[in-house]
Amino acid sequence: QQQQVPPQSILFILRALPEECASDRLFLINDQDRFLMRDHLIDSSAAVFGFLMHHLSQQSEPQQQSHLYTLEVLKAWNAWIRYVPVRPHVVAESPILPATVQTLIQAATPGHTLHYDIVEQAADA
């Protein structure tokens, strides 16, 4: 029987992968490998953004878990757009961009219930 990988593990990998690829600490014998990996990340951006948007919209969990889950999704998206030179049209066409803006608008609404760290990640992205 095949076990599914928990989404939190995938979110961690999606956050760490772009950071590590861009890191100067990652020693490669052939620097061409770094560019090849970066190109793979660029080509995967639309699929990654779709995955993140799908999981950003999953809010059926208890409030505290939902908060932590939203934070992990936004951290992954933030890392992706910070370290991967994503094509502008991919970002513009992704529904995660308006969802992030909506998060900021919601935070500005009186009586909002968003945690500061979610707003901070949304603003960074």
Image (cartoon, rainbow, N blue to C red):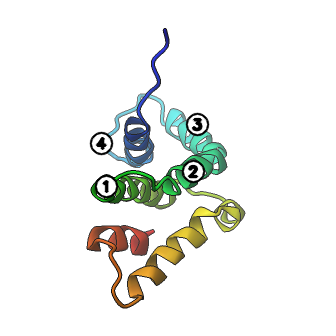
Q: Earlier in the sequence, mark 1 or mark 2?
A: 2
For this rendering, which residue is in front, 40 or 64?
64
* Residue at x 60%, y 57% (from the top left corner): 86
* Mark 1 touches mark 3? (CB < 8 Å): no
Q: In x, y percent, where is residue 3?
A: 45, 18
x 36%, y 74%: residue? 119
51 displayed left or right of 109: right
Q: How crowded is mark 3: few (under 14 residues within 10 Å), some or many (20 or more)?
A: few
The x and y percentages for residue 99 are 55, 69
User: What type is the residue that disc 2 sits on?
Assistant: His
The foreground one among 13 and 50 is 50
- Which of the two labelled residues, at mark 3 and mark 2, occupies the earlier sequence position? 3
If you read the primary sequence from the N terminus, does the residue marked by circle 1 or circle 3 appear first?
3
Q: Which mark is residue 54?
A: 2
Residue 5 drawn at (x, y percent): 44, 27
Amino acid, disc 3: Leu
Q: Which residue lies furthest to the top in this view?
A: 1
Residue 41: horizontal and vertical position, in percent?
57, 43
Q: What residue type is labelled 1?
A: Leu
* Mark toward the start of the polypeptide (2 vs 4): 4
To which residue does mark 4 refer? 25
In the picture, the quarter occupied by the C terminus is bottom left
Q: Which residue bears the numbered disc 1?
A: 68
Dividing the picture into quadrants, the one containing residue 114 is bottom left
Using the image, tell me which numbered label, if any, was put on residue 36. Answer: 3
Q: Tag 1's secondary structure? A: helix
First of labels 3, 4 by sequence position: 4
Q: Looking at the picture, which amino acid does disc 4 mark? A: Arg
Q: Is mark 4 on a helix, strand or loop?
A: loop
- The mark closer to the camera, 1 or 3, is 1
Number of residues whose C-alpha sits closer than 10 Å to that of mark 2, classed few (under 14), some (14–19) or many (20 or more): few
Residues under labels 3 and 4: Cα distance? 17 Å
